[in-house]
Amino acid sequence: MISAQAWADAQRLWDFQKMGHELRPCSVAIGLGSHDLRVADTTAELYHRGMAPLIVFTGATSRTTRERMPRGEAEHYRERAIELRVPASVIVVEPNARNTGENLRFSRALLEKRGIAVSSALLVSKPYEERRAYATACKVWPEVDWVSTSTSMPFDEYVEAIQDVRLVVDMLVGAQQRLTVYPRQGFMIEQPIPSDVAAAYERLKAEGFTSRLVAEKTL
């Protein structure tokens, strides 16, 4: 359990991360690897809705996925999408990326090598990383018109699905921190941060939701 204030602050960060982009057909859908198979589910749904003729799943493994996804995040995503009736022929796997920047750089290189032109892309991530993913994509691949999206679900339902509220809040705080520090390092474009979002982040950090923070001095 967490305090009512912490819950409200986490909800504010959750709401800020959602970009609210209107879905539209794009050249490709790129599913960013993570622990959450719902990214693959949502990417498959977008394919079936005719939103993209091609899918790229990108991701190796991380400390949170090496046991549950031993063949790599992208490969497990591919298998899940095929279970959901996506043809294997429209799925490209990028198995080496270990962070969001690499997800985008490696996917770009893979598509360019195959001669696939990309003018627009659906960027599918976890709900609390829509904005971070978008800001990174705009920096790494600015020529593309990006539509950032995720599985549509309320904050409380996501917490219930993960079954670990502290982990979810830690991840929200980590995603929010990166929006502040990564632009200074050239990893993503700047995102204006409302004062109430900044205040919510500071309160959560002061309460100890810090396990997903990066050490700013080493960036």
Image: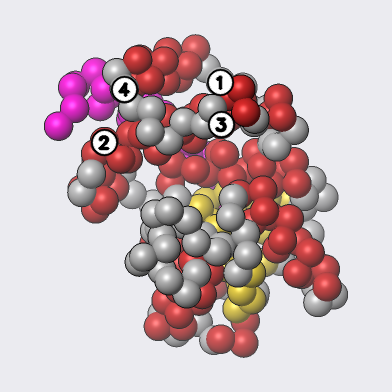
Marks 4 and 3, how far apart in space?
17 Å
Is 169 or 86 nearer to us in this picture? 169
For badge 1, the amino acid type reads: Ile
Relative to 175, say whether 109 is above or below: below
| Residue at mark 1 | 193
Marks 4 and 1, how far apart in space?
21 Å
The image position of residue 132, as x and y in percent, is: 57, 39
Relative to 114, say whether 68 is above or below: above
Marks 2 and 4, how far apart in space?
10 Å
For badge 2, the amino acid type reads: Arg
| Residue 68 magenta | no
Is any part of residue 194 visible from this angle?
yes
| Residue at mark 3 | 178
Relative to 132, say whether 5 is above or below: above
The image position of residue 124, as x and y in percent, is: 53, 56
The image position of residue 30, as x and y in percent, is: 61, 62
Q: Which mark is residue 166?
A: 2
| Residue at mark 4 | 208
